[in-house]
Amino acid sequence: MDTEEFLLPRSQAANERLHALIPGGAHTYAKGDDQYPENLAPVISHGRGAHVWDVDGNRYIEYGSGLRSVSLGHAHPRVTEAVRRELDRGSNFVRPSIVEVEAAERFLATVPTAEMVKFAKNGSDATTAAVRLARAATGRPRVALCADHPFFSVDDWFIGTTPMSAGIPESTNELTVTFPYGDLAATEEMLTRYQDEVACLILEPATHTEPPPGYLTGLRELADRHGCVLVFDEMITGFRWSEAGAQGLYGVVPDLSTFGKALGNGFAVSALAGRRDLMERGGLRHSGDRVFLLSTTHGAETHSLAAAMAVQATYVEEGITARLHALGERLAAGVREAAAGMGVGDHIVVRGRASNLVFATLDENRQPSQQYRTLFLRRLLAGGVLAPSFVVSSALSDADIDHTVDVVAQACAVYRKALDAADPAPWLGGRPVKPVFRRLA
């Protein structure tokens, strides 16, 4: 049994303080300490580039930065300078700032498939606004969401479909139906079953696998034929697939799309974008019933919009998407080689587009295992790698990736021992990590 101890006493104490005052000990469930090995959930002091430091003084190479939001690295100088300029000019006024139209012009130049845009602070508000707009435009009650995608919103129409549905009336849940990704026949069957009831189809246009040939085009045709609104959730694919998101890469134009995460490089900004005739229903220049689309006090904070403009300029001018892909390819190749070299290539599996890599940890029967994930995460943390996923940022260096691969190789050696023993328990150091969506704490 491996006896090496990696301890985080100050982080442990900070986690206790967090749980005493904040439900769940974090403001995002995916950041909870239940997602990490017991007593090994670092509490962050600060970050710069691709590195973060915890309150115990340890430095880590960080992946999945800010749940995929910090794709340029922490404290990116171009972004922070743009933010700093606006902070000295005031952040929020009783009327729109000129920054709002400048940010809209920049966004629509970057995502030319959209005709209008409205900014908000988080992704849930944007996706829920898209759903409300689709219901208003079609006069239909049901929302059809892709069952294979993990998250769309904190709001009832989605959370009611998860194991954490406490507090959501069944009458609300009945209005949400699902369809499988990549299966046009099943989607058409669902639309036929609920003929003239489905307001929209909402999905991530791409995920850890590429869309099957013709799938997005076929979905566009299905939505048109059945009179429902096609919504692309581009929270993850936005910028990581192309500057214009997956719709820009694959050439299929949705009616509405939502962006966030990478848009602000960690600053709070999201966007709902789409067809003018739909978006204008939330405006003042139409004759129909008004839609309460998005109206948030902080939706147009000048510094967040300045951050978004700086991010878009950086992506376009510096070819960031291509860099993310190159870094991801180098990382994926290294991890796969390290895993194969240690005889666990069939058990530690890297998946996804190079700019959005995740990993699976499989047991002796090649089934997903939270216990083996715990073992793997423990070894990565001890080696200075904070990696709930292998999602890269452009701030990573080749040396960072080489170090990561070395640490992965060491983790794979321990993984092999556990597989040979058919029991990872001696290497867990406590309870296994847990899935976010579960009924009981």
Image: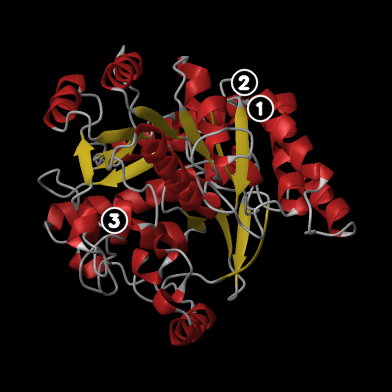
Q: Residue 131: tell me if it is visible.
A: yes
Q: Nearer the viewer, residue 258 or 324?
A: 258
Along the horizontal axis of the image, is 225 left or right of 422? right
**Residue kind at label 2, given as amino acid type:** Pro
Q: Nearer the viewer, residue 157 or 217?
A: 157
Q: CA distance from mark 3 to mark 2?
A: 41 Å
Colouring scheme, one of rainbow, by chain, secondary structure, one colour: secondary structure
Q: Residue at x 40, y 70 (%)?
A: 33
At which x and y percent is residue 152? 38, 47
- What secondary structure is marked by label 1? helix
Give the residue at mark 1.
108
Give the residue at mark 2.
112
Q: Are marks 2 and 1 in contact (CB under 8 Å)?
A: yes
Quadrant of the rendered image containing residue 390? top left
Give the residue at mark 3.
373
Report the quarter where the C terminus lies: bottom left
Earlier sequence position, callout 1 versus callout 3: 1
- What secondary structure is marked by label 3? helix
Q: Residue at x 44, y 40 (%)?
A: 133
Along the horizontal axis of the image, is 204 left or right of 400? left
